Every structure is written in C-alpha cells, then in structure tokens.
Image (spheres, helix red, strand yellow):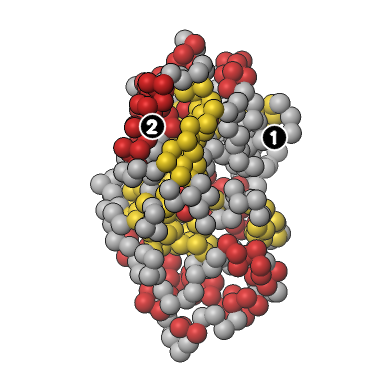
Amino acid sequence: MRNRTATDKEQSPIFIPWSSVAGIGWPAVPRQFEARILALQYQLDQSQWWEAEALQRLQLRQMEMLLVHAERTVPFYRGRFKALAGLKRVTMEAWRKIPTLLRTDIQDHGQDLVSRKMPEGHGRIREIRSSGSTGRPISVKTTDVTQLFFAALNLRYHLWRSRDFRGKTAKIIRPISSKSQIKPQGWVPGYNSGPMVSLGVTSTVAEQVAWLREEDPHYLFTYPSNLRAILDHCQNNGVELSNLCGIATMGEVVEDTLRAACEEVLGLSLSDCYSAQEVGIIALQCPDHPHYHVQSERIFLEILNNDGTPCGPGETGRVVLTDLHNFAMPLIRYEIGDYGEFGEPCPCGRGLPVLSRILGRQRNMLTLPSGDLIWPLFDSNNLDQYGPVGQAQLVQRTTEELELRMVVKKALKPRDEKCLRKAVLDRLGHPFTLNLVCVDEIPRLANGKFEDFMSEVK
C-alpha cells in the first residue's frame, strides 16, 4: 500500500493558518471564523479521548439547553416534552420518552419547527434543502454556528487521515452547472492549502478518468458507486492515477469489496464519512479501523428497535439523531431513515461511540411475503462473474417479484441468465420471481447517488 504525502518530501507537512494581519505570516493571526475553528479543534482533540460516560454527561447538559430553547420558542415542540416535567436534570430514561421526529413532520410542519426567537451569537440563518430519493424535499434552517461546527469536524477528518494540506483535491460528488469548477483558495478552512477542483458526477466515467489524469490530484472525494466505476475503468484500460495519496467516500454504503478493490487497483485504503444534509457530519471512519466514530460533540445518536427501546452492540435498528447546536430549527430525536448497528468500544482508545455498520435507508430493505424486513445480501459489483454485466440494480416490485435491471456489454447467453438468477436468489434466501431486464442506463438519484437495491413495496 502506498504511503506518501502530497509533496513526497521527507519532512512533516507544515500547516499554517491564513493570517489576517498585514505583514505577519507566521505565527499567523487568523480571522475570527478561522480562530473559532481552531479553538473548537483544540477542544475536539481532547474530547475524543474522554470516557464514553463523560461525553454522554456533557451531551445531556447540552440537550437540556436545547430543550429549554425549543419549548420556549419553537411552536412544534410546545407540550412535546411532558415526560421531562418536574425534572431538574434530563435523564436518559426521560429522554427516550420524547416522541421521535419524522421526515413527514418536517415536511408538514416545517415553519412550526423554526424558532421564533434566536439566542444571541448564532449568526445568520441559512436554508438547506434535501430531496433524498423520495422526490419530496425537506427544508431545514441552520446557522453560522452549525456551519462552524461542520468546518471544525471537517478539519478533524483531515487531521485523522493525516492529509497533506498542500495537496490538490478533486471532488466528483453532485451534479454541478459547469463541466469543471476550481476553488483556488483551497479546501481546508482557514489554512493555506492546495486548490480544490470539482466535476459533476453525471459526467461519463471515461470523462471523469480523463479529467483526473489531466488534473492529477492528490486526493479524491466521491460516492462509493462512482469510485467503483472509476476503479473498473482504470483496471480494464490500464490507467494509473499514480499521484493519488488518499481516497474518501460519502453518501452511500461502502461494501468490503470496494475497500478491497481500492487497495488492489490504486494501492490505497479508502476512508468514509457518514453525513446528511440536514445535520452535517454524523460519524467519521476511525483512523485505525474500518468502523466509524459518532461525532458526539455535535450529534447525539441513538439506534432503536421497532418498539423504541435502544439497541445493543450488533443489533440493527433505526438511526435517530439530535443536532445539539441547531437552535434555528431544532431536530430533536430525528428519525433520519437510516438503519445501523453500534459496535463495541474501539481499541484505538477514543471514547466516541462506535458504529460497526451503516446499512442505509428503509427503502433498501427487502420485504418477505410474511411481511418481515431483511437486508438483502446483494452486491451489484459482483455480477460480472456470471456474464457481461456492466451495471445492475435490483428492484423489488411486490413481495413476490423482483426485477434485475442490467446494463450489459452484449446479450446474455441462456446459461448466463440461469447462473445469474441462481446467484441472486441464493443470496436473498427466498424463491422470488426474478425478471431480468436489459436497459441502456440506470440513472442516479436526483442528488447524484446510486442505489443498487430499491424497494417499491409500501
């Protein structure tokens, strides 16, 4: 596996913030926003090593302040915290009695979720629109403070991965208006860093690889499914991206097969970030292990069973989030729609909770004829061993019928179709009716993401 910095020099990278004072470059005197990022990073560098109990104790204190503000100034929450009446301190037992907030609540009562009186110091209010894949968007208000925490956690992410700030970064994330965009002032808030270039994810894979060879970046940020396509193209066409020092993914579930392919083709391990537009960064992959650490200084994360009780390590449940610092539109016990699993404490020594698995959305669950829901053991990236399948997506139409949509390089032979059907159904563990459908392309979602399994069963 390759181990190098963006400059391939022996000395350690030197990270110097921007200086706001003319004539003084070092030590730098940063502007207020950058100074706040560095002040938060100083605290984050310490709190990551605290015991889990200490982290939760401080989370509860912050949750108390958020609850008081929400009940006083947010119409939606008035009367919603009856379980806390008479308590001097919020306990976990009482906290779990607060009703969860659903996506439909935000869609139907958006304005009633907005604070009527903001505390001082939170800055400007911004609007974020998240469409997801449902086609019905939600609008969330955020503040300068939430943006500040996002920047601080983003800096933690770079530091955890030991990224060289002097390097050039390429992003292939969401559809953008122009073919290629450049941000010459850099990609690390407050620091003298290398440039960042962006390309729309709707560009063809061949265009993306040609662009990467031309830009020759040190770091690449993209969706897992798009990375898979880039790796396949490079491997099939003998293309080397030898200047790359790091790969980062976000927005989709990362399979072990993708991690292995990244190491095989590029000689690099990938790092992943679990985030959502509504709340920002939720969890970051551990620097030393493939699992994730919840960013507890920013987010309180619960995983719940169907009856609302908390899941233990290794149990799959609904991910419920509380944004600890959004006072403009408090998201308290928000069911984001994902499923996940907690893991055991991390050997790295960090007290931040461990997410061992992030399983994606409920729409990615397979419904059995009995009505039971299971996670489909389906990986579209392994189907080429059964025939000339370039891309595939499995769609559940009914509780008995599935449709495998495929982009094929040439017509499948009857033997290929038989092997393909058997392989898919064996993995699913039920004798569904499986229809094979060849298509010209499988479009991405409106947000640029790709899902290899989707259910249309309501």
Please name whichever residue, 271 or 347, is drawn nearer the observer in this view of the structure. 271
Please name whichever residue, 353 or 378, is drawn nearer the observer in this view of the structure. 378
- Can residue 331 be seen in the rendering of this structure? yes
Tell me if 242 is positioned left or right of 291 in this view: right
Please name whichever residue, 419 or 310, is drawn nearer the observer in this view of the structure. 419
The secondary element bearing badge 2 is classed as helix
Q: Could you tell me which residue is drawn at 47 percent across and 23 percent down?
A: 389
Q: Judge whether 59 appears above or below 369 on screen.
A: below
> In the image as oriented, which residue stretches furthest toward the bottom?
86
Tell me if 116 is positioned left or right of 152 in this view: right
What residue does disc 2 label? Answer: 421
Tell me if 168 is positioned left or right of 346 in this view: right
Please name whichever residue, 241 or 200, is drawn nearer the observer in this view of the structure. 200
Q: How many other residues sit within 10 Å of disc 2, few (<14), some (14-19) or many (≥20)?
A: some
Percent x, y of residue 304: 38, 64
Q: Could you tell me which residue is drawn at 34 percent across and 56 percent down?
A: 316
Q: Judge whether 402 appears above or below 229 on screen.
A: below
Residue 30 got which mark?
A: none
Distance of mark 2 from mark 1, alpha carbons?
Answer: 38 Å
Task: Determine the image quadrant of residue 253.
Answer: top left
The amino acid type, in three-letter code, at marker 1 is Ile
The amino acid type, in three-letter code, at marker 2 is Arg
What residue does disc 1 label? Answer: 176
Q: Which badge, 2 or 1, is on the more N-terminal residue?
A: 1
Assign the N terminus to one quadrant of the image: top left
Q: Could you tell me which residue is drawn at 53 percent across and 75 percent down?
A: 67
Q: Could you tell me which residue is drawn at 55 percent across and 65 percent down?
A: 102
